[in-house]
Image (tube, rainbow, N blue to C red):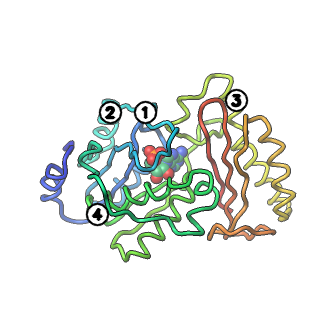
Amino acid sequence: MIIARTIEELQEAKKSLTGSIGFVPTMGALHQGHLSLIRRARDENTHLIVSVFVNPTQFLEGEDLEAYPRKDDADIKICTLAGVDILFMPSIDVMYEKDELCIGAPAVRGYVLEGEKRPGHFDGMLQVVMKLLNLSGATHAYFGKKDAQQLALIMQMVKNYFMDVNIVPCDIVRDEKGLALSSRNVYLKDDEVERALALSQSLKKATHMILAKEFNVERIKKEMLSILSQTDKVEYVAIVNRDFQAIEEIEIGNTIILVAAWVGKPRLIDNLWI
Ligand code: AMP
């Protein structure tokens, strides 16, 4: 595996590549969720590039940029074992200059839910994903459904900017109790782990209600909120169509249920695609 830390090193490493390039961008502290994307990209492509970069422009003032878990040595080992060809680990200076041209999240889809709670987050996310897709020369780029709105906005960016890359959505990976894996789960103290399960349990409850033919969004949300009262603060429970517009009745095959809540230090998100 080649570790590239500069643009020149990355371009040099890419010279020998022929055939499809799978790409998995991450912020590191790799876990089984990331690994599922990496394995899939490995299986489906001739070459595999992974990036580890904690992108400052997607963190808001007061968020956990400084404290965000960094595990470079472990990440290098994991990528080596997973058969990654090139691991791109740039510094902030390599990725950004002052007074940059920026792209922005769309005015409606980009400013509901996560975009409303974290204004500016998606601008920074799209900016870095655009850079990384261009740099990697990926033919296929893999993103988790865990970040549902992020995935939708990246697909929209690729469409709106006529970018030549296939975006591959990947299923959410959970632990044995149902907690969606996240690098931020390391912040959870023992007693908080149990309460964090409320997010996935609320989604499970929604699944059971829908299987029992309850399609009324308000009634489903009410039951979910009662389970989510175990968390410290619910930021939102939303039931939307795949364009992130509010709906009143579940539309099978076109609905996403999303939750965001605080448990101790971390703000957790989870979702379910119906
Ligand atoms: P991050 O390092 O948190 O920026 O995540 C990098 C990529 O991994 C994103 O596409 C995430 O959606 C994806 N990812 C993170 N956690 C999970 C998970 N539990 N299951 C599936 N994909 C995930």
Asked whether mark 1 and ligand 1 are closer than 8 Å, the reply comes as no
Indicate the amino acid at tag 3.
Glu
Quickly name the residue at label 1.
66
Q: Amino acid at mark 2?
A: Asp
Image position of 83 with respect to 196: above or below: below
Instruction: Answer with mark 4 or mark 1, whichever residue precedes in sequence.
Output: 1
Q: Is residue 178 left or right of residue 100?
A: right
Of callouts 1 and 3, which one flags the residue occurring earlier in the amino acid sequence? Answer: 1
For label 3, the residue is 194
Residue 273's label in the rendered image is: none
Whole-percent x, y for residue 35 in the image: 42, 44
x, y percentage for residue 137?
A: 26, 63
Q: Please provide percent x and percent y for residue 14.
A: 17, 57
Q: Which residue is mark 4?
A: 134
Residues 234 and 151: in front is: 234
Where is 187 relative to 165, above or below? above
Q: Residue at x 72, y 69 (%)?
A: 252
Q: What secondary structure is marked by label 3?
A: helix
What amino acid type is highlighted by mark number 1? Glu
Q: Identity of the amino acid at label 4?
A: Asn
**Front: mark 3 or 4:** 4
Cα–Cα gap, marks 1 and 3 = 26 Å
* Viewer-side label of 1, 3: 1
